[in-house]
Image: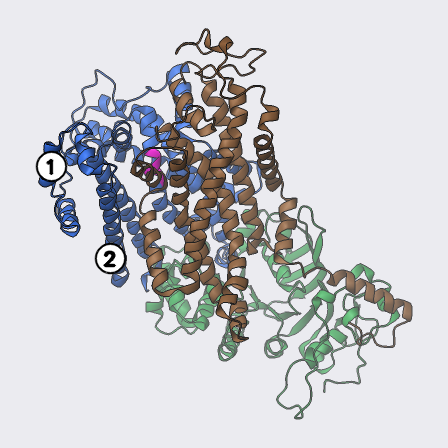
Chain colours: A brown, B green, C blue
Amino acid sequence: MSERSIGLLGERKKARLEELARASADKGGVSLVRDAARRLRRNPVAIVGAIIVGLFVLVAAFAPLIAPHDPVQRFDELTRNLTVDNIPGASSEFPLGSDPLGRDFLSRLIYGSRQTLFVGVLATLIGLAFGVVFGALAGAFGGWIDVILMRLTDVMLALPSLLLAITLVAMASKSSQWTVIFAVAIVNVPIFARLLRGSMLAQRESDHVLAARALGVKERNIVLRHMLPNSLTAVIVQATLTFAVAILDAAALSFLGLGDPDINRAEWGLMLGVDGQRYFEVRPELAYYPALAIIVVALGFTLLGEAMREAIDPKNRR
Amino acid sequence: MSLLDVRDLSVVFQRRGERPFTAVDKVSFTVEPGQTVGLVGESGCGKSVTSLAIMGLLPRRGNKVTGEVLFDGADLLKLRPDDMRDRRGRDIGMIFQDPLSSLNPVIPIGIQVAEVLERHRGMDHKAALKEAKELLDAVGIPDPMRRLKEYPHQISGGMRQRALIAIALACKPRLLIADEPTTALDVTIQAQILTLLKQLVDETGTALIMITHDLGVVAGLCDTVNVLYGGKVVERARRHELFGHARHPYTHGLLNSVPRLDSPRGERLHAIPGSVADNIPWAEGCAFAPRCPNVVDACLEGPPPLEPTATGGDLRCNNPVSEEVAVP
Amino acid sequence: MLRVIVRRLLQLVVTLIALSALIFIWLRNLPGGPVDALLGERATPETRALLTKALGYDQPILVQYGKFMQRILTGDFGNSIRTGDPVTEVIGRAFPATVELALAAMIIAVGLGVPLGYLAARWRGRFLDNLTIAGTLLGISIPIFFLGYLLKDVFTQNIHWFPPSGRVSTGIDNTNVTGFFVLDGLLTREFDAAADALWHLLLPAITLATIPLAVIVRITRASVLDVLNEDYVRTAEAKGLRHRTIRGRHILRNALLPVVTAIGLQTGALLSGAVLTEKVYNWGGLGTLITDSISGSRDYPVLQALILLAALVFVVVNLLVDLSYAFIDPRVRVR
């Protein structure tokens, strides 16, 4: 910028010129991640999603402080008139009334956020962990490892998601909380594996990896420092979206009678799928509230994930 | 009366939450029937936006177009969208930069030529296909009968651009706009396409607006040249005036940066320093000032006016290159 | 092209063989073994030994696998533990019900999804677009069995527009020809039966269509937005073509390519969703069969056949979708 302003120009004008040029040149040069984060913060969809997710986590964390009662205790006031056709409704003591076993429905809903978070997070993380290992191995080494791993994902993808989960649960001798978590997790393994592998293969051929290889960087370092980090953003986005799918799948398994058999456990999917179904005619609220909770939380994670995906999409960079 | 008279055309892009950006800033020029006019400048100077504004092809939202575009005396900017649609392809044809992406990949070439004939010349499908074959033949595509049924990915880049020229000229428009028609092509093909364009324009009497960053293209084709910088016309001259006596330092720089076979060995090519990113807003002074070797104090005191020159052109410069200094 | 087909077919066969092997291993390793699973825990050692021999479980594992495959390939899946009927018969009875439901759902999803997606893209950022996007987000966030109950509650309990469950009303005498009740009614000219079947079909089909509909709307919208930015659309505009021509020939023809793939993948969502929807509406198809075969004691012969059938349908549909590309997209044809 300096040499070209020839001596014809006065000193003051020279300074002004430098200033103007600097102002107009100061546009580019923002890093990919920071650029994405900036767009994310400006996106109202992302903000709504983040608020929902944040509230959900807060409620789960502070459930004991928020809930008015113990979620597993059966109250005499509630059990006294309890029959299959009559489940006590709202009262000042129990703002949302009773569940079919005479427990405080509101407290169970609040505590339910904990179990739902637990199931969703574990199912997502387990699926992610296996998927990332599979995908990274296939993407990094290629060759026969790639072929075997991809045929394996083919087999898993040959069954539609819920049917695979049903099959997996049916394989277990007894259903428990863990059969649900694992079944839902394993459904997502091939999705993560494919995603990571695809992204890594694309990067194998990319200029920055070729450049690193030409410079003699060790293959292991190329994979660990160049290919994996760049591919992980897409995986993280997918994980956010997977959480929503995971809690919906868990609820579906409960609805089919394949869920967690522990009657003390308060989890939204269970509440909706078991009690909500069975007593829908008598007290539809037993379905409405957990359903609403699931919908809002699934929506929150979906909004956040979609906004993240949009933010890292190079098409939206300008 | 001029065939096309563009008066004070401005295009401002306005996106929600962003500062408005003036892509084209009060551009005026005329095109006489049968004449070839060049719009020249670096990418981002507003030349393509100008052509899209004339065609009414800018997105419906996010921009403001002002000024007048008089075609045969009628203002195209004031036409109803459907009336403009009737004129596009019939009165004004256009060819674009990238012939591969400009053709629909899943439709045979023949239909892509024929549909414009069906639309504007009222032909039935059979007659249109027959005429399409003639058109492909006229633009120098060998074995046109076979090409009618082929898809864009099956023919070469040069042939695709020939097909696009056939489409644009199918209805014998009085004006053809060519937006960087050779940029995406191999050098050897470029010359063929330019020769073809010149030949067709001469034969049909169609006026041509040639949009390019390549002064070599201008030299062989244009009668008049408009040089654009930062959305404004900075110099307008007849071809020979421009190549003989470029007055604006920017035009001068463009000419000097063209490699020449007859220049002495070892002589360096003169590139214009900086890039369009170094522009300053016209309101502050001359947009080219940061890159200009002739910059003077006046250049930062507001935009210089576009003034007529002795040779019949126009110039927007406070300190032009002196006329005695010819291009080396 | 032929080579691609052969390769895909080989892949399909490998996938299905691997799946059958997994199922075989699973059945072999049932808690207490397959014999207990068949006989229950109270069987005497004698019957147990007899059945073990009869089923060939005393033979080497590879021989057993060979016999297992042989039976599968000849379509012999044994008898249902629950009802004692041959598995093929049990599945054959339920199959048309699910196909009818899934087809109806797919027709709704595509018929509504493509126009909605196109309009949303055309009016990007406007009210209709925002409303559509909000709707699709809700559609993929709602547990569909809950939606089923909700619709059932509103349309059959509060306002009696639709029957609550089942495939036909009592008193309607429908002749069974194909097992597709709507089609049967039309074929036998029993139009009241056809109308009744359609009337029963509508609510479950809407429920099942929710997720595929949401997905198809989103993909159509994204795809149309991509195509709108393509140079060839600008060329078409520069030619002054009529809006109709540009929309049909230049935008939709290109934009629908990804949608076709999505439709194939949504078969999976339909199969999954059918399990839930059929339970809500007591539909009596394959979904109901799966649920019944799992709850309580597991009906393994039926389960294994259902799993293989679902995989076969899903994989074959997607293969067909991929192959159909060759006819839609000339760029694939030459390869």
> Pointer 1: residues within 10 angstroms few (<14), some, or many (20+)?
some
Residue A78 part of the magenta-drawn span: no
Which of pointers 2 and 1 lies earlier in the amino acid sequence?
A: 2
- Residue A252's spot in the image, x, y percent? 39, 32
- Residue positioned most to the bottom: B265
Secondary structure state at the residue bearing disc 1: helix
- Residue B6's spot in the image, x, y percent? 68, 60
- Residue A173's spot in the image, x, y percent? 30, 35
Residue located 68% across and 84% down the image: B269
Query: Looking at the figure, which quarter contains the N terminus of chain A?
Result: bottom right
Using the image, determine if residue A301 lies above or below residue C230. above
Residue located 41% across and 50% down the image: C258
Using the image, determine if residue B251 lies above or below residue C106. below
- Residue positioned most to the top: A81
Residue B154, quarter of the rendered image: bottom left
**Where does label 2 land, which residue?**
C10
Read off the magenta span: C269-274
Asked if labels 2 and 1 share a chain, the reply is: yes
**Who is closer to the viewer here, B175 or C197?**
C197
Tell me the chain of label 2: C
Residue C272 part of the magenta-drawn span: yes
- Residue C239's spot in the image, x, y percent? 49, 57
| Marks 2,1: beta carbons within 8 A | no
**Who is closer to the viewer here, C213 or A239?**
A239
Which labelled disc corresponds to residue C49? 1
Kind of residue indicated by mark 1: Ala
Tell me the chain of label 1: C
Q: Can the viewer see residue C146 in this picture?
A: yes
- Residue positioned most to the front: C45
**Who is closer to the viewer here, B257 or A158?**
A158
Kind of residue indicated by mark 2: Leu
Going by the image, does A176 lie left or right of C177?
right
